[in-house]
């Protein structure tokens, strides 16, 4: 194999283990970045790399360290595979629950065994007990506060608000909050309530229809005009069920189909969101579906925490092993 002029190749000399050299280069990447120069993209030269000095342990210890870090990488790979398996399982569960539902026995309905319980519709095959509704008939859709208005001479109040960046796919991220000034007489119409379903108006294709359920962790709190607030009728619609429908492939296909598009952007309006038609089971069944999906989401979060823990462990091992702060007893590891 060959490389072009944009690549610098490291050829291990005698006494240097290739695997150890690989981890060493990754560990010193921040130094290489600081040495980088360029306007369009950063690059380092052979001379820049030659300025970096570092002590290597004996070859046997290099191999032992590389073996430890290989094991850490294997654990990370297994954790990531488990996380991806959990995500795939949830996608399959969402599809099954939102088209088959939960029967009286607490299990997924089976259209093959009980075809009389299902009906074919233009939207697909759904349980007969489910009702086809539009958003406007079962929830109230509200727009948020518009930024940048001239409020000179108006009595205002400053409050936190949710932006598109706060509304992620399936959850609300309040790590970084901003505030906005609004007229005292107007802010009540933009106030969020617990169980409001928040949904982005658009932006990049991946942001269209992205959303989650607001849990009221900050009060009072407003929302920006690029974030829709959908307030379900609590007697007819569970907010977590609605959030699952919006985030499902069925929901995404609808919003992408009716969205106004440019080259890389897409957006929907309040009228289109109000017209969104979807099937609704009885409220108790909705809540059961929401609970099952919440449990599946928690399994995903648990696997993601496991990935993060393994990644932190590897970073810690690199910090102590590649700096010599902790030495590996070669006699105990060499074969």
Image (spheres, helix red, strand yellow):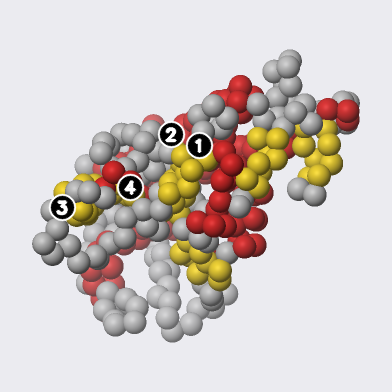
Mark 1 surroundings: few (<14), some (14-19) or many (≥20) residues within 10 A: many
- Outermost residue to the top: 105
At horizontal 57% and vertical 30% (from top left) the residue drawn is 236
- Measured Cα–Cα span from mark 3 to mark 4: 14 Å
- Measured Cα–Cα span from mark 3 to mark 1: 29 Å
Please provide percent x and percent y for residue 200. 45, 54
Q: Is residue 50 above or below residue 137?
A: below
Q: In terms of sequence position, does the residue under pointer 1 or pointer 2 come before the other?
A: 2
Image quadrant where residue 124 sits: top right
- The reply to whether dot 1 and dot 2 touch (C-beta < 8 Å) is yes
Q: Can I make out residue 59 in this image?
A: no
Q: Can I make out residue 223 in this image?
A: yes
Left or right: 285 as drawn, with respect to 71: right
Q: Secondary structure at mark 4?
A: helix
Can you identify the residue that label 2 sits on? Answer: 195
At horizontal 24% and vertical 65% (from top left) the residue drawn is 149
Left or right: 263 as drawn, with respect to 12: right
At horizontal 58% and vertical 64% (from top left) the residue drawn is 259
Q: Secondary structure at mark 3?
A: strand
- Measured Cα–Cα span from mark 3 to mark 2: 27 Å
Query: Residue 190 shows which numbered tag?
Result: 4
Image quadrant where residue 181 sits: bottom left
Can you identify the residue that label 1 sits on? Answer: 232
Can you identify the residue that label 3 sits on? Answer: 156
Left or right: 278 as drawn, with respect to 173: right
Q: In terms of sequence position, does the residue under pointer 3 or pointer 1 come before the other?
A: 3
Q: In terms of sequence position, does the residue under pointer 2 or pointer 4 come before the other?
A: 4
Q: In terms of sequence position, does the residue under pointer 3 or pointer 4 come before the other?
A: 3
Image quadrant where residue 30 sits: bottom left
Please provide percent x and percent y for residue 295. 54, 27
Q: In terms of sequence position, does the residue under pointer 1 or pointer 4 come before the other?
A: 4
């Amino acid at each position: 194999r060959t490389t072009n002029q944009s690549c610098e190749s490291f050829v291990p000399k005698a006494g240097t283990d290739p695997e150890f050299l690989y981890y060493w280069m990754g560990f010193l990447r921040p130094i290489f970045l600081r040495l980088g120069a360029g306007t369009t993209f950063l690059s380092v030269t052979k001379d820049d790399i030659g300025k970096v000095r570092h002590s290597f342990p004996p070859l046997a210890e290099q191999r032992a360290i590389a073996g430890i870090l290989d094991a850490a990488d294997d654990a990370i790979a297994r954790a990531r595979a488990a996380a991806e398996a959990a995500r795939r399982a949830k996608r399959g569960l969402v599809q099954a629950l939102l088209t088959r539902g939960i029967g009286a026995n607490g299990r997924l309905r089976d259209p093959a065994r009980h075809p009389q319980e299902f009906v074919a519709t233009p939207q697909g095959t759904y349980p007969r007990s489910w009702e086809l509704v539009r958003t406007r008939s079962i929830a109230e859709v509200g727009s948020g506060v518009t930024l940048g208005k001239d409020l000179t001479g108006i009595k205002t109040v400053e409050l936190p608000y949710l932006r598109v960046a706060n509304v992620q796919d399936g959850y609300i991220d309040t790590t970084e909050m901003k505030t906005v000034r609004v007229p005292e007489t107007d802010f009540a119409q933009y106030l969020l309530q617990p169980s409001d379903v928040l949904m982005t108006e658009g932006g990049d294709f991946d942001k269209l229809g992205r959303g989650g359920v607001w849990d009221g962790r900050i009060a009072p709190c407003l929302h920006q005009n690029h974030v829709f607030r959908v307030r379900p009728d609590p007697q007819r619609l569970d907010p977590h069920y609605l959030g699952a429908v919006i985030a499902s492939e069925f929901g995404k296909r609808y919003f992408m189909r009716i969205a106004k598009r440019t080259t890389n952007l897409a957006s929907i309006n309040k009228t289109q969101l109000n017209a969104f038609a979807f099937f609704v089971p009885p409220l108790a069944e909705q809540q059961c579906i929401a609970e099952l999906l919440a449990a599946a989401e928690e399994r995903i979060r648990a696997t993601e925490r496991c990935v993060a823990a393994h990644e932190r462990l590897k970073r810690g091992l690199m910090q102590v092993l590649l700096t010599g702060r902790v030495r590996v007893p070669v006699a105990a590891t060499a074969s």
